[in-house]
Amino acid sequence: MNSDDPAVRRIELTLHKPWFALYARIKPTLVIAGRGQPAQWGIGTWQVPAHQTVVVGVYLFNRMWRFGRAEFALEPQHPPALVYRAPALPFLRGRIRTNPPNPPTPPS
């Protein structure tokens, strides 16, 4: 990275599909700062500006309508890990929250 590039940080996003869902073969779409991109269920990482608030959103699309939409305004002081939980029913909203890093376990 050269000195002209804006500072970026890497965030981790975990996309959870419910174990019982009334929809099949639907993959999430991730939207970062207004730009949509396909994603996979599970853990992924993306780059975002380091010193700006960025809106991170996720939705599901079944060829007819969007559902499971959730957004989170990720600020620079937030931990760099988010968790998205998709709804079990195709007309409900999803949820995004921060996933704070696990505290170190004390030695035994």
Image (cartoon, rainbow, N blue to C red):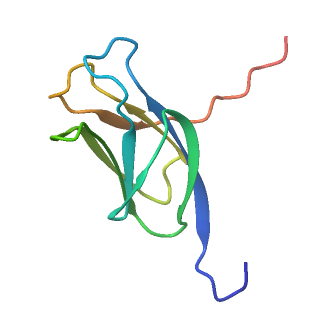
Can you say which quadrant of the picture contains the C terminus? Answer: top right
- Asked which quadrant contains residue 37, the reply is bottom left
Q: Position of residue 53 (x, y in %)?
A: 40, 64
Identity of the residue furthest to the right in this view: 108
Q: Position of residue 101 (x, y in %)?
A: 61, 35
Left or right of residue 77: residue 86: left
**Residue depicted at 73% across the width and 78% down the height:** 1
**Residue depicted at 48% across the width and 33% down the height:** 41
Left or right of residue 37: residue 69: left
Asked if 57 appears above or below 20 in the picture, the reply is below
**Residue depicted at 16% across the width and 41% down the height:** 65
- Asked which quadrant contains residue 64, the reply is top left
Residue nearest the observer in this picture, 103 or 13? 13
Asked if 13 appears above or below 26 in the picture, the reply is below
**Residue depicted at 57% across the width and 43% down the height:** 44
**Number of disc labels:** 0
Residue nearest the observer in this picture, 96 or 24? 24
Identity of the residue furthest to the bottom in this view: 4
Residue nearest the observer in this picture, 6 or 18? 18
- Asked which quadrant contains residue 22, the reply is top left
Q: Position of residue 14 (x, y in %)?
A: 51, 35
Q: Position of residue 23 (x, y in %)?
A: 27, 22
